Amino acid sequence: MRVLAAHDVIIGVDVGTSVTKAVAFGRDGRAVASASRPSRLERLPGGRVEQDLEDVLRTVGEVCREVAAALPGPPAALALTGQGDGMWLRDAAGRAVRPPISWMDGRAGDTVARWGEDGTLRALYALTGSGVFPGCHAPLLAWLAEHEPEALARAEVAGYCVDAVAQRLTGVIGVDASDASLPFLDVTTRQYVTQALDVCGIAAYARLLPPPAAPGAVARLDGAGARLLGLPAGLPVTAGPYDLPACAIGSGVCEVGDGLLIVGTTLASQVLTDSARIDPAGDPAGMWLCTPDPDRWLRAMPAMVGTAALEWVLEFTGATTAELDAILEAAPPGANGVTALPFLSGAGERAPFVEPAARGRLDGLTLGATRADAVRAVCEAVAYAARHCLEAAGLSASLALCGGGTRSTAWARLFADVIGRPVRIPNEPEVGARGAVAVAWRALGDPVDAERWQADARTVEPRADLRELFEDGYAGYRARLDEALGGWRATGPRSWAAYGTH
């Protein structure tokens, strides 16, 4: 471990859905110590997914204590980030009034389906530019109002994971503007749109939505928080942005047009923009996210496809992730004519188009097709889907790549080939915590060198000799997708009951 003075280090904590991580970063953006702990995720009948706030706080305390023990003294600050969406109802003391509902929860699927049929989703999108899915605030508030009104009556705040943890550490009730962006916020004014709550029939619960914190807000660790973490009371604490924007910042997205592609269980595409303009006639997909800069936003397209599609085809063909690079090298680009549509979620797709009936396909199979052809076809299709999302989000400058999918050198190179531009892969894998730390340094009045942080990465270049092949491949993918969309929308099921994936 490098030896740094404690005041040159900030601990970033990323409270994920099933794992909490703490990483101490120096001002150069490099990790000096880290720790992780699993947290419990309760999967219940009816697509319900819940967590335990006290268990989450336990993990935060354990990872912070472990990382702090590896430092020469207390850090300069604590920076929080974590999962977004869901519903973390608390009282004035920060205690859960019911188990927090995860963003993965599907109980409000029927509500979203009904809103899709009666025009509510499009009306909401026209007001705030936010797509909606069952695990976000609007349908969850509506579901609770119908089924558990007593929980809403006991609550002081309807928040998110990051601000729930922050409240218990600092005593401050608040929310970062990035979390509040979906689905009620006018991201240009950072004010809630009253009509958006009216459209959803939940205006009576506007009292539960705390106003977004001002950019650069800093709280302080209180006595209870200090005892939990083993850090001094009064330590500066920043809460947010949540994990998607934090990953963008931590990956070096800093100029308008820069983008980030997170290749995780799902794909999350984001592009930095200086203009948040809503197209009321557009497909109600994606979202606009506030950033620490009041005049900068992230246009996000979080698709349902990703490494989950890869894992399915590997299992289907009897292969493992350890074999992926060799398998991709065993089939030529174009997969010997085998093609795929990678929409394997039972919930369909939500970006860059919304279609609950979307389903996956493998086409062009013959007796001569190999498992390598099938795997490559799915990997190419996921890359085509990523390009589709990034184009819809407005990518025009540099592109960073992070997430578990980047562990495969061959797949990372495939993304560069398909997207047709170099991709930058940060050397530090915990980009969420890294981004939160960068925001914290700025809030303390001592911003980091963004160019230096961005440069700490490796670059994968697209192969010029494959450009025409993948341009043709992408055109074919879009044509097959357009044809399939026509069929899905004409005859497919409209249920959103399973639409609980982030």
Image (tube, rainbow, N blue to C red):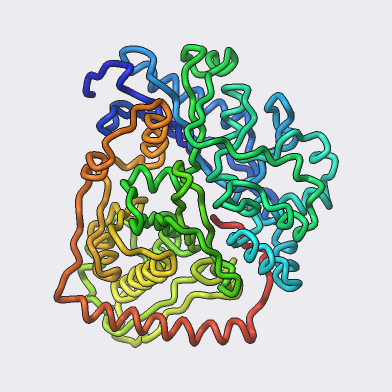
Q: Quadrant of the N terminus?
A: top left
Q: Measuring from the top left, give residue 143's x and y in whole percent.
A: 77, 53
- The quarter in which the C terminus is drawn is bottom right
Q: In this view, does 63 lie above or below 472?
A: above
Q: Is residue 47 above or below residue 279?
A: above
Residue located 63% across and 47% down the image: 191
Task: Return the x and y of residue 444 as percentages of the image width and height.
Answer: 41, 25
Q: Which residue lies furthest to the left in this view?
A: 465
- In the foreground, 130 or 215: 215
Work out whether 458 lies above or below 445: below
Horizontally, residue 160 falls left or right of residue 324, namely: right
Q: Which residue is drawn at 55% across and 39% down?
A: 176
Residue drawn where x is 58% and y is 73% of the image: 355
The one nearer the camera, 452 or 140, is: 452
Residue located at (31% from left, 71% from top)? 376
Q: Quadrant of residue 496?
A: bottom right
In the image, residue 314 lies at what x, y percent? 38, 64
Residue 325, quarter of picture = bottom left
Answer with left or right where residue 302 lies relative to residue 207: left
Task: State the residue in front, 80 or 330.
Answer: 80
Q: How many labels does the image show?
A: 0
Q: Is residue 163 above or below residue 412?
A: above
Residue 235 image offset from top left, x and y in percent: 47, 17
Left or right: where 424 falls relative to 315: left
The residue lying toward the viewer, choosing from 418 and 195, is: 195
